[in-house]
Image (cartoon, rainbow, N blue to C red):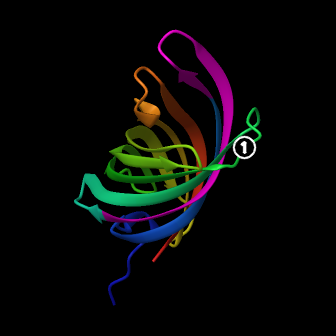
Amino acid sequence: MLTQTFDDLSWTGGYIGLQLGSRDNTASDGSTSEEINIDSVGLHTGYLYDLGTFVVGGELSFDRVSSDEADDDDTDMIRLRGRVGYDLGKFMPYVTLGAAHVSDDDVSKNGISYGIGAEYRVTKKFNLGLESSRTTFTDVDNTDGLGFDVDLIQIRGSYRF
C-alpha cells in the first residue's frame, strides 16, 4: 500500500479561510499626509499548483477595512492576486501581485496590491500564515494628488480541500 507522509504532501489544491489585520497607514494629497490606523477582517479563497520546488496560484480576498480615526462607514476592499511560493515541505514563503478595488459611500477606485508572506501547514487540512501587503490607490475620485496606501499585516488561517 502506498502511503504519503505528512511532510510529502503537495501544496496543490483549493483553500478557503479568514484573515485579521492591522497597521498604520498614510493618506496623502501631494502636499500633506496623515497617519491612520487601519484594522481589517476578511475572507480569502484560492487555488495553488505545486510544481515541485515552486508553488503558483491565485487568490481572491475580501476585507472589511475600518479606521479608528474615521466615524464613517467601513470600506470594502477586494483583491485578486497571483501567488508564487517556494515549497519547503510544511513551510512556504511566497510573494503576491495583483489588482484591487476599494469602495464605500464616497470612493470607488481600482489599485494595485503586492506583498510577501509565509504559510505553515499545521495539519493536512489547516494552514496558518502571516502576510504583509500594500495596496496602492492613486487619483482617488479623480483628484490629482489624492492617494492612499493600505498597508496590512494579517494573520491568516486556511482550510485546504
Q: Quick check: can you spot residue 158?
A: no
| Residue 121 at least partly seen | yes
Q: Is residue 12 left or right of residue 19?
A: left
Q: Which residues are magenta?
A: 25-48
Q: Quadrant of the N terminus?
A: bottom left
Q: Is residue 155 magenta?
A: no
Residue at point 38%, 81% (across, down): 3
In the image, residue 47 lies in the stretch drawn in magenta = yes
Quadrant of the rendering where the C terminus is positioned? bottom left
Question: Which residue, as the protein is rendered here, is positioned at the far left?
Answer: 51
**Which quadrant holds residue 42?**
bottom right
The image shows residue 104, relative to residue 35, as above or below, that is below
Could you tell me which secondary element the residue under label 1 belongs to?
loop
**Front in this rendered view, residue 35 or 51:** 35
Dominant secondary-structure state across the stretch colored magenta: strand
In this picture, is 50 found above or below 28? below
Residue 57: x and y in percent read 30, 59
Q: Which residue is mark 1?
A: 72
* In the displayed structure image, the side of residue 98 where residue 45 appears, left or right: right
Residue 137, percent across and down?
43, 34
User: Which residue corresponds to the image point at 63% horizontal and 19% vertical from the top-left?
Assistant: 34
Residue at (52, 58) in percent of width and height: 62
